[in-house]
Image: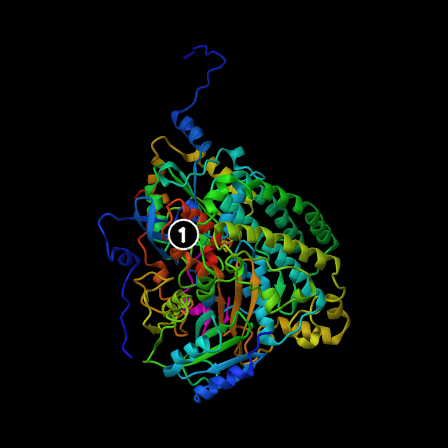
Amino acid sequence: MAIELPENVVISKLDQLANWCRKNSLWPMPFATACCGIELMATGASKHDLARFGAEVFRFSPRQCDLMIVAGRVVMKMLPVLQRIWQQMHEPKWCISMGACASTGGVFDTYSVVQGIDRFLPVDMYVPGCPPRPEQLIQSIIDLQDKIQREGTLNGREFNLESRQEPKRALVEIPSASLFDGARNPIF
Amino acid sequence: MATTDTTTLQALQGRFPAVTTSEFRGQTRVVVPSESLYDVLAFLKNDRGFDFLSDVTCVDYLNYRDAKDRFGLVYILVSTLTNERLFVRSFLNEPELAVPSAVPLWEGANWLEREVWDMFGIKFVGHPDLRRILLPPEYTAHPLRKDYPLQGRGERHNFPVLARNSA
Amino acid sequence: MSLVAPQHATVEDVVRDDAQDYLWTLNFGPQHPATHTTLRLLLKLDGERVVDAVPDIGYLHSGFEKLGEHLDYNQYVTVTDRMNYISPMANNVAWHTSVERLLGIEITPRCQYIRSIVAELARISDHLLCNGAVGLDVGAFTFFLYAFYQREVLYDIFETLCGARFTNSYTRVGGLMHDMTPLVIEKIRAFLRKFPKTLDDMDRLLNRNKIFIDRTKGVGILTKEQAINRSASGPIARASGVTRDLRKDEPYLAYKDFDFQVCCAPAGDCLARYLVRMAEMRESLKIVEQAVENLPAGEINVGINQRTALPSKKMVYSSIEGTISHFELTMSNRGFEVPHEESYAANEAANGELGFYLVGDGNDVAYRARCRPPSFIHFALFPDLIRGHTLSDIVAVLGSLNIIAAELDR
Ligand code: SF4
């Protein structure tokens, strides 16, 4: 087909157009529980200015948001709340697990802290650090935008992929009995 | 430095002969049998001016060297007038894990005692609302006991898993 | 003695107890922007008026005290950072004050001064956030930005001092991570010069602001008797007329060398708590200034015969005692000697009396590390403070109590 196009027309796939719109207007839901929440606030504040990356519209109602940022440790009393909030968000939605605690439990390998929210929720991005610096969180949001642009589809087919269903685990779980011999002397 | 007037101790021992005292790093401790705990606390508050209850806590002496009793309650009392500090100790053994509540004396004891109940399973008789405070109500263990493992018994991972397409 | 079963199994039962049909129940939290943290309230409302409030906490209970039984005295300082993450330095100092009380260590004058400086800077940063958040909650957004800007300056000082913005872990048993550099002192001096101006601006913004005063005056009154009876401490007790300040009453660190005043107010309402915090920041500035100008020279760590703090590199390389001491302290089965005893030491942290009750069993790991958390005790006051006020006063009262969930639940 040799049709002359005017200069101000761009041809694209509908999928890509939708992704482009989505990635530049992420509305985060700040699920800030602990110390990482302070850095999350700093990321949104004037010095680091999340608005430069189109993700500054923090909304506290899950129904308005499409990006959940879990900042801080999630304990067993909080996890059902977290899952409830995740379910209340509309598709398409993404989740960033910010900080060592949300990703793996961090220093808190104790009876009440969930060792990584990815055991119970799908997570798209992990941000290492305790707490991650604001720059690191911004980098993860940029990476997430890349990911949305790369593999997103208009009706969210990518969320149904087989590989997306399995819970991701970075580490094999060590049986808890062997971590501490007796009450003392941690052996790791 | 937190010190306690000797007249207080003398008055206390005059009233309750079973009380023993000791001192470490300038901090005076009195050990009280659990039957007379409430009377001692009431005496200290009403007659000796210890109007401020700084803390209520407990220690589980399960594998502590030379320990005779399983649980040791600690009440930290302060007099806001003289700034004296006094540590009241009382020891408990299973199965009688119950002491009278200090809430009628100091309302501040309310949540502190609930926390001790939650963490150690010690009952405070006469407490207005002795519920678990930090852990979920369906929790069965008392985690600060020494026979409870640090990583718990799997309670932390007893939840349904949400998959990507299940929302 | 008869055992009573717990009257209520869950928090919902408490509210359901005497349901009158014109009252309705509102769930507030645990994930709500105005709580700032993860706490939950079940409110019983008569229209706009709060008839009763039942707090439900534990949404951030992470087992700090259990962890204290498994990490040694130097490792656990990292966990205290995460306790009151608004002023972590104060927690570091409180923790190691308690450990040193148990071990019977007398720290060097320079270390005392530096610890006083960082603890007071932490107090300023805590009060800035608390007052800023009160302002934010009742609608004074500009005020919040003034406060937050200065917090970034403080973060910068801490970062220069120890490399982390707010998870500092700066203290060690018997000393500090490292000494203050001239650059840090310069930055603190600059802060001391500029900050009073910001404080004046903040005073001018809110102290005579009609809306702010209407929202906070007479709201959430805590009487002096109640404050003492319910174990309140810190600025909250002082705003109710309790003249108790551990820095004066049980002097620790170098506080007896400094000239400062204890700030009190008689009213006991939210406004008084705000004003006490504002005044305390000025007093803290005075302390920091005196400490920085009179900083004694000398070592920051205790000597090697105390066998707790690592000896200096020079000593390790040039003397046999230094080498042995360094070697022994880093061996996992040596460490330092801890008495078979228990002790308690409290500091006046930004929120109130922050103390640790430690039980030593000869190991370099505490047998029991109990923390006396001021936020926990202050949040217990909340139902009494809010009863009879309107729904919109909740945020003002909550803000003025300065509840930090990680310290509340540990
Ligand atoms: S990762 Fe570190 S800073 Fe973040 S919540 Fe956990 S302990 Fe706090």
Task: Please state the horizontal and vertical placement of residue B152, each as a whole percent of the image.
Answer: 38, 66
A137 relative to B115, above or below? above
Closest to the observer, B151 or C83: C83
Label 1 environment density (alpha carbons within 10 Å; few <14, some 14–19, many ≥20) = many
Q: Quadrant of the N terminus of chain C?
A: bottom left
> Residue C89 vs residue B90: left or right?
right
Q: Which residue is located at x 75 percent, y 57 percent? A: C293
Q: Please tell me whether residue B9 is drawn above or below residue A43 in the rendered image.
A: below
- Determine the residue located farthest toward the left in the rendered image: C21
- Residue C89 pos. (x, y %): 59, 58
Q: Is residue A185 one of those drawn in magenta?
A: yes
The percent position of residue C319, horizontal first and vertical second, equals 76, 73
| Residue in the foreground of this view, choosing between C181 and C146 | C146
Picture quadrant where residue A17 is located: top left
Residue located beneath label 1 in the image: A117
Where, quadrant-wise, is the C terminus of chain C in this rendering? bottom left
* Chain part drawn in magenta: A167-188
Q: Secondary structure at mark 1?
A: helix
Residue B127 x %, y %: 33, 69
Q: Which residue: 53% across, 50% down?
A: C274
Q: Residue at x 47, y 59 (%)?
A: C375
In this orientation, does residue A54 appear?
A: yes
Whether B40 is drawn above or below C49: the answer is below
Residue C397 appears left or right of B7: left
The three-letter code of the residue at mark 1 reads Ile
